[in-house]
């Protein structure tokens, strides 16, 4: 590490080759303001202070051409640590310009309705914040820059761009009870996709990849919370009487099985015990799976009414809630024992697949006032998830559906990488953008889960009511997509199946198989055999929604070509991109030429054997 003069202290981010990535200030923020780190001349290497905070800074080359930065912060009894971060300025070193529309940023925010994916910057963009990582690429040339989490911390990470600077760090928003260490990684490369993949391999040491990805059926998207045991019986029978028999190994009863949030007794639509549910699923030839939202609890459950001491507190001192549900305080030993007993009971009942839901950012934030604040929010969640893992055993399969990556990596076998899918083009468009940015995680952090493969439409089912009740409204704003616009056509849903297939992770169906016709069943059957490796969205940083996803399987090489436009569009391959010249479309059996002479229909996809 190199440090400049104390009037403008910066650290140098240098690769093993000696190439300088950039100069960065170390900044600490508390309730009294923002403080720049200065080294202590008489102290040990890297030791310094910022506004009275003692901070140790370590900078070292890491594998894969990355630079590792560690920030270790000592507690102060009289202060709350709001944020600690590195500040790099645009157009300095290898940091691209941040106030120009020629720079694109990989953006992964918390909010469902904030734009996700690769976005253009520029003065009109304003301040944007990504979580876990970001990548910056300039159309003006020069290498791309990746900034990401380098170690698993107890607090949320953030990567903030305001047009002038990139801030990369963590936001504890709490009084520290012990020294905390925060790790970041910085890397540069000519190809941003290669940079993401190298980053994934570097994080593999934290991941959990011993279980191969799985395929199955889940009750949620068709049945919602209305599901009954009779519905499950009908779906299992339909699967076993179809071409899907033997291809789907898992069968999951989703939300709707229990009496109430936090009350794990099956409701009147199911057999009296979880064991009876799991037994029927296993006897039909499937690994039994079950949905759970273990962080939240109904005010009308027994716990909600009589054990209000088990919940996090709100500002007024009462139980904290999110979406009407109370938030269990996972920092309490009694609550952790409750988690263990819940999941050990489901394990003993015969379940081997566990979908953990509703551990969302807004709910986790409600844990700010908890019994034990010696760990940060993500440390608390990580402790709870470890408790669940211990209860269900190493051989059970856990899907993380909403918990922050820092809190779940290494514990869960799979993670959802997109928002809920529904049979609307608005959801297909939104989720495809998001999925393309997470493909690098597959088999590095865990198996990726792109939510459900859906095909029901007027062409594939005679169902009078293909979706549960929702509010009809136009799709007027791109990112106000939730069940907006008309329901998707068969052709549009084949686009979605193409995305799921090329993602190369878990594949779960969630239509009513018993209600699909031959056309629908034939389309679903073409998802098998599954792709076991994620495709490469080769134009991710050229087109905001990538059009070309190149499969990386040598056994079954495939290329997906998309037209995301609402109008017909020719296939225009970007200059310098090496793609196959033609292929056979899996959906139609036709030969397709890859070039501008081929005009694609609006909202369409080719899934090509090449």
Image (tube, rainbow, N blue to C red):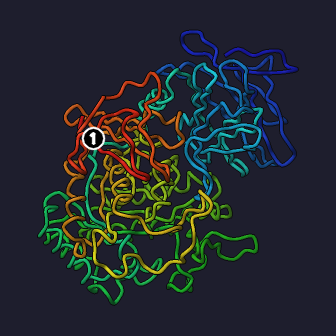
- How far across and how far down the image is residue 593, in percent? 30, 35
Residue in the image at 23% along x and 69% along y:
350
- How far across and how far down the image is residue 555, in percent? 19, 34
The quarter holding residue 73 reads: top right
The quarter holding residue 137 reads: top right
Is 291 on the left-hand or right-hand side of 348? right
Residue in the image at 60% along x and 53% along y:
110
Q: Is residue 382 above or below residue 102?
A: below
Q: Is residue 96 above or below residue 256?
A: above
Q: Nearer the viewer, residue 40 or 347?
A: 347
Q: Is residue 34 above or below residue 242?
A: above
Residue in the image at 17% along x and 73% along y:
238
The quarter holding residue 475 reads: bottom right
Is 315 on the left-hand or right-hand side of 210? right
- How far across and how far down the image is residue 289, in percent? 29, 66
Asked which secondary structure carries label 1, the reply is strand
């Amino acid at each position: 590490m190199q440090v400049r003069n104390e009037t403008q202290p910066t650290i140098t981010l240098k690769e093993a080759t000696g190439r300088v990535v950039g100069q960065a200030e170390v900044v600490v923020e508390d309730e009294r303001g923002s403080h720049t780190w200065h080294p202590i001349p008489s102290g040990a290497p890297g030791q310094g202070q910022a506004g009275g905070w003692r901070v140790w800074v370590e900078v070292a080359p890491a594998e894969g051409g990355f630079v590792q930065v560690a920030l270790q912060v000592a507690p102060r009894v009289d202060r709350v640590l709001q944020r600690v971060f590195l500040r790099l300025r645009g157009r300095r070193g290898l940091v691209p310009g941040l106030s120009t529309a020629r720079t694109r940023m990989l953006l992964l925010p918390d909010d469902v309705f904030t734009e996700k994916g690769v976005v253009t910057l520029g003065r009109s963009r304003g301040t944007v914040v990504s979580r876990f990582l970001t990548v910056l690429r300039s159309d003006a040339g020069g290498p791309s820059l990746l900034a990401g989490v380098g170690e698993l911390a107890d607090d949320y990470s953030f990567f903030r761009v305001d047009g002038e600077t990139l801030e990369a760090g963590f936001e504890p928003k709490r009084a520290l009870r012990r020294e905390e260490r925060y790790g970041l990684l910085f890397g540069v490369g000519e190809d941003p996709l290669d940079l993401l993949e190298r980053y994934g391999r570097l994080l593999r040491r934290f991941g959990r990849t011993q279980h191969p990805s799985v395929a199955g059926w889940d009750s949620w998207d068709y049945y919602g919370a209305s599901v009954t045991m009779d519905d499950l019986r009908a779906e299992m029978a339909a699967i076993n009487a179809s071409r899907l028999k033997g291809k789907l190994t898992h069968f999951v009863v989703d939300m709707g099985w229990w009496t109430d949030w936090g009350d794990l007794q099956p409701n009147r639509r199911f057999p009296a015990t979880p064991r009876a549910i799991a037994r029927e699923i296993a006897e039909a030839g499937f690994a039994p799976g079950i949905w759970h939202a273990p962080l939240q609890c109904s005010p009308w459950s027994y716990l909600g009414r009589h054990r209000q001491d088990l919940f996090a507190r709100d500002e007024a001192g009462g139980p904290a809630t999110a979406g009407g549900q109370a938030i269990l305080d996972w920092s309490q030993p009694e609550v952790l024992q409750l988690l263990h007993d819940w999941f050990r009971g489901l394990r003993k009942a015969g379940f081997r697949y566990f979908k953990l839901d509703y551990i969302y950012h807004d709910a986790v934030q409600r844990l700010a006032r908890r019994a034990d604040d010696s760990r940060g929010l993500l440390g608390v969640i990580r402790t709870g998830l470890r408790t669940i893992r211990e209860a269900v055993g190493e051989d059970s399969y856990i899907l993380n559906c909403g918990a922050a990556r820092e809190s779940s990596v290494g514990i869960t076998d799979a993670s959802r990488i997109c928002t809920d899918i529904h049979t609307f083009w608005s959801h297909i468009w939104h989720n495809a953008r998001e999925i393309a940015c997470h493909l690098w995680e597959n088999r590095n952090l865990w198996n990726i889960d792109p939510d459900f493969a859906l095909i029901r439409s007027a062409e594939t089912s005679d169902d009078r009511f293909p979706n549960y009740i929702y509010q009809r409204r136009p799709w007027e704003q791109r990112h106000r997509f939730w069940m907006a616009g008309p329901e998707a056509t068969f052709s549009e849903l084949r686009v979605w199946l193409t995305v799921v297939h090329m993602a190369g992770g878990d594949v779960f169906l969630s239509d009513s198989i018993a209600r699909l016709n031959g056309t629908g069943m034939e389309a679903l059957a073409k998802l098998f055999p599954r792709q076991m490796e994620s495709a490469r969205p080769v134009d991710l940083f050229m087109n905001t929604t990538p059009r070309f996803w190149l499969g990386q399987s040598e056994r079954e090489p495939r290329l997906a070509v998309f037209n995301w436009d609402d109008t017909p569009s020719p296939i225009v391959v970007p200059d310098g991109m090496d793609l196959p010249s033609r292929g056979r479309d899996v959906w139609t059996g036709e030969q397709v030429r890859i070039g501008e002479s081929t005009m694609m229909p609006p909202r369409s996809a080719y899934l090509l054997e090449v």
